[in-house]
């Protein structure tokens, strides 16, 4: 299966926020790799996934208490 890169604007900033999100993303079978650029003003979350479903990621991150919106090209 071909991987897609999904890019999101978030408000994930503190180390505790990252740990909370890490538990979710690391347990998702469709997420191959991920990272958060906490130095970027948009707190960019990049996800390499074999299932292009940004709505799933947005739902998962917002349920954890964070803002999340897809950044399109």
Image (cartoon, rainbow, N blue to C red):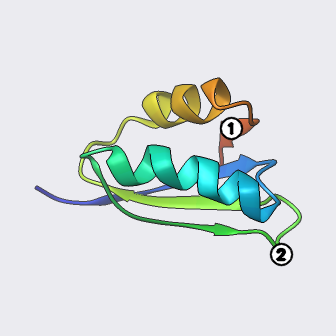
Q: Nearer the viewer, residue 72 or 60?
A: 60
Query: Label 2: which residue?
Result: 39
Residue 66, percent from left and from top: 74, 36
Q: Is 37 located above or below residue 60 in the figure?
A: below
The answer to which image quadrant residue 51 occupies is top left
Q: State the residue lying farthest toward the right.
A: 41
Q: Is residue 10 left or right of residue 45?
A: right
Residue in the picture at 44% in, 49% down: 25
How many numbered dots are placed on residues in this image?
2
Quadrant location of the C terminus?
bottom right
Q: Nearer the viewer, residue 15 or 73?
A: 15
Q: State the residue lying farthest toward the bottom.
A: 39
Judge the density around disc 1: few (<14), some (14-19), many (≥20) Cα neighbours within 10 Å. some
- Mark 1 element type: strand
Q: Nearer the viewer, residue 71 or 38?
A: 38
Q: Is 38 located above or below residue 10 in the figure?
A: below
Answer yes or no: is residue 24 visible.
yes
Residue 3, percent from left and from top: 25, 60
Judge the density around disc 2: few (<14), some (14-19), many (≥20) Cα neighbours within 10 Å. few
Quadrant location of the N terminus?
bottom left
Q: Marks 2/1: CA distance?
A: 18 Å
Answer yes or no: is residue 73 visible.
no
Residue 35 is marked as none
Query: Label 1: which residue?
Result: 69
Residue 55, percent from left and from top: 49, 28
Residue in the picture at 89% in, 64% down: 41
Residue in the picture at 58% in, 49% down: 21
Q: State the residue lying farthest toward the left.
A: 1
């Amino acid at each position: 299966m071909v991987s897609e890169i999904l890019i999101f604007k978030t408000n994930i900033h503190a180390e505790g926020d990252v740990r909370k999100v890490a538990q979710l993303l690391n347990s998702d079978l469709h997420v191959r790799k991920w990272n958060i650029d906490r130095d970027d003003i948009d707190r960019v979350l990049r996800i390499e996934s074999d299932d292009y479903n940004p709505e799933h990621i947005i739902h998962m991150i917002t349920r954890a208490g964070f803002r999340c919106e897809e950044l399109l090209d």
